Image: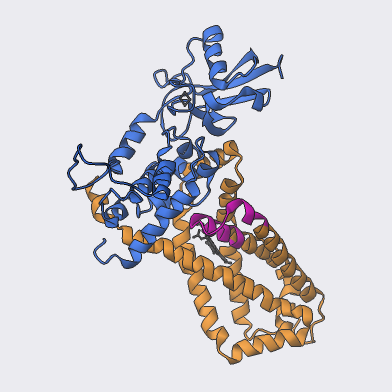
Chain colours: A blue, B orange
Amino acid sequence: MADRLLTFSIFRYNPITPEIPPRMQEYQLEETMGMSLFIALNRLREELDPSLMFDFVCRAAICGSCAMLINGRPGLACKTLTQDMPDRITVMPLPVFKLVGDLSVDTGVWFRHLNVRTEAWIHTDKVFNPEAIEERMDNPTAQAIYDAERCIECGCCIGACATANMRADFMGAAFLNRIARFMIDPRDERPMAQYFDVVGTDEGVFGCIGLMACDDLCPMEIPLQGQLAFVRRKMAQMALKCARCK
Amino acid sequence: MILQKLLAKSPKLETRLELLELATGLMLFGFLQFHMFAVSSIILGVDAFNRDSARMDEYYLSYIGIPLIILALIVHGLVALRKAPWKIQEMRVFVQHSRRLAHLDTWAWGVQILTALIILVLAATHIWSVLVTWPIEAATSAARIQGGYFSNFVLLIVAAEIHAMVGLYRILVKWSWIHRKKFTNYLVYATIGMVGLGFLTLLVFYFRSIPKGLS
Ligand code: HEM
Ligand code: FES
């Protein structure tokens, strides 16, 4: 494994200088023990090209800021070891999100919009009493909520989705997974009709054509096929029985 | 939210369209396989084929079934094609995305769009040519296949079976009725089996001698 000379082909483009067209630039680097793409990119920037732009915060697959296309597929750079990769590695920024420059994209605005649209907080009329003992929740429900909550908002599912790539207004797996999380939460008192209004549309769950690249490529391995199907079934039930819905 | 969207969007309608796509897709899937088994009776002989055809005629199955299937095809085409990449940019985005991703399920959708267009043209000519030589008899079918329709049928059988099987797979995945990885193999075997049956039927028709006066 050691002594390999890796070739990185990296997407370069800076929206501030649109006169320089997008291009792939090549760099070479000696592989070291346990090298991740995070380490490789940092060395490239330090040793070869200080102008290279990319994002990192936690370097431990927690913050979700280092998602990029690694040999064409969305993944976390900090979680990708070069020992699992061929000698030649192409790296591009995630599609769908606003390109900041080179490998850096703005997922923040997109996810902020998601949280606003899904109203990602518990809706309840109960007044919180800090003195009272917390209400119990059964274990399977807590587990199911936790499964959905593991999303780190990296955007890999969105970058991997053909519909999200083709249609800017499609909500995508991260969005629908968030909706599913609140739908199963017994503390949330929102009526199903309210969810129906947000995701029972072609921009919502019915924009999904079932390609499952999200499910295959989610770095957190959230069971997205099941999450999407759960929302889909609930919405189908609403369409068949909700008399008041539009 | 913007005014025209606020007024135009209708979750109920959009969901029902999706259910219509599901229903017509399943219905056409069922029909295609039934049709394939029905015409394959020629393998057992001319009499078996003609008996089947006459019986469907007798019980009015043909007169209810055929209009229903034509309607289902039109409705299915209209609702399913709303997902297709109509704009040249969408099409290029899809192809570039699929090449980068190298992901089988994603490519399979492109195949589905392509086979849909093949079916659209070939199924139309197929239905037309059958209806103008009504009733369905082994001799007229053989004459048709020997008279230049052979390659059309090869393409139609392959396109229809692939489209239908990928479509079924997609339905099962979207509604999560199956374990994805396990089921793929069965569908591949089923596709190969049905295409094989179709080809065998086609060959039997091709080498059948036709009574005089029909060729
Ligand atoms: C032999 C006849 C046909 C059969 C058995 C068939 C079957 C199916 C099935 C089962 C699906 C999956 C539906 C779903 O995901 O809900 C599907 C999807 C599709 N069909 Fe067909 N179909 C046939 C003919 C056609 C024709 C003639 C067209 C269009 C001209 C068409 C266009 C499409 C398209 C574009 C999709 C993909 C839609 C999506 O991804 O949501 N099909 N078909
Ligand atoms: S740097 Fe935080 S997930 Fe990779």
Of the 4 image quadrants, the one containing the C terminus of chain B is bottom right
SS majority, magenta: helix
Residue displayed at 78% across by 81% down: B44
**Rendered residue at 64%/19% (across/down):** A7
> Which residues are drawn in magenta?
B164-185
Residue B142 sits above or below residue A159 on the image: below
Quarter of the figure with the N terminus of chain B: top left
Residue B84 x/y as whole percent: 48, 52
Label tally: 0
Instruction: Reply above or below: B35 against A20.
Output: below
A58 lies left or right of B130: left
Query: Which one is in front, B196 or B91?
Result: B196
Residue A180 rendering spot, x and y as whole percentages:
38, 48
In this view of the protein, which residue sits in the foreground, B139 or A240?
Answer: A240
| Residue A191 visible | yes
Decide: is A58 above or below A166. above
**Who is closer to the viewer here, B194 or A59?**
A59
Q: Is residue A206 visible?
A: no
Q: Position of residue A31 (x, y in %)?
A: 65, 15
In terms of image quadrants, where is residue A230? bottom left
Front residue of B124 and B36:
B36
Is A244 covered by the magenta stretch?
A: no
Query: As drawn, is B37 to the left or to the right of B43?
Result: left
Q: Position of residue A233 (x, y in %)?
A: 41, 59
Q: Position of B72 compared to A139: left or right?
A: right
Residue at the spot x=71%, y=14% of the render? A3
Residue B174 located within the stretch drawn in magenta:
yes
Q: Quadrant of residue B98?
A: top right
